[in-house]
Image (cartoon, rainbow, N blue to C red):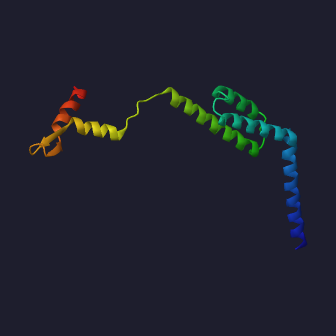
């Protein structure tokens, strides 16, 4: 049993060395990492406030910040910023493309009003499919 404990302790020591090595090899101090996260959060705040920052500027700032990212924690913030930039770009495109929007209820009311025919001496109404067909046929000739 003592050999097993000794082996487990050696494995734990190896893991500790690996973690220290990774942190040391990143070239960033904890303060520098805080500054990266602060810049990322400021960019996210600017993106969420309408009109504060343009998409190209935000993308440039995000790319500049990303060059210093070395850890998953900062990479997650970078991903959130990227999603916000994409949403803002999508909203800008939506504003540029103004597709006519139709109110389905109004369309049906107007359609019924135009193609209604009276039957039984005007006491009842019926949808006149023939009139609709003639009117729609003009679109396909």
Q: Is 15 in front, or is 66? A: 66
For residue 66, what is the image quadrant? top right
Q: Is 120 displayed left or right of 55 in the figure?
A: left
Q: Is 119 in front, or is 43? A: 119
Q: Name the spot of residue 64 as percent of width and height, x first.
A: 74, 30
Q: Residue at x 35, y 40 (%)?
A: 104
Residue 97 lies, with reference to residue 32, above or below; the image says above
Give the position of the N terminus as an image quadrant.
bottom right
Q: Is 16 displayed left or right of 83 in the figure?
A: right
Q: Name the spot of residue 59 as percent of width and height, x first.
A: 67, 30
Q: Is 132 in front, or is 141? A: 132
Residue 42 lies, with reference to residue 14, above or below; the image says above
Q: Is 96 in front, or is 104? A: 104
| Residue furthest left in the image | 121
Q: Residue at x 51, y 26 (%)?
A: 96
Q: Name the spot of residue 99 as percent of width and height, x first.
A: 43, 30
Q: Residue at x 84, y 50 (%)?
A: 19
Q: Residue at x 14, y 41 (%)?
A: 118
Q: Is 51 displayed left or right of 29 in the figure?
A: left
Q: Name the spot of residue 45 as percent of width and height, x first.
A: 70, 37
Could one spot residue 29 in this view of the protein?
no
């Amino acid at each position: 049993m003592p050999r097993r404990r000794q082996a487990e302790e050696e494995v734990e020591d190896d893991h500790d060395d690996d973690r220290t090595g990774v942190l040391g090899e990143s070239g960033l101090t904890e303060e520098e990492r805080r500054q990266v996260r602060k810049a990322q959060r400021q960019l996210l705040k600017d993106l969420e406030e309408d009109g504060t920052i343009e998409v190209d500027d935000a993308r440039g700032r995000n790319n500049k910040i990303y060059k210093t990212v070395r850890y998953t924690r900062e990479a997650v913030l970078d991903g959130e910023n990227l999603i916000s930039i994409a949403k803002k770009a999508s909203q800008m495109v939506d504003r540029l493309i103004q597709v006519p929007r139709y109110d389905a209820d109004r369309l049906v009311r107007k359609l019924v009003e135009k193609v209604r025919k009276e039957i039984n001496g005007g006491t009842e109404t019926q949808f006149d499919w023939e009139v609709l067909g003639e009117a729609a046929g003009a679109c396909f000739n």
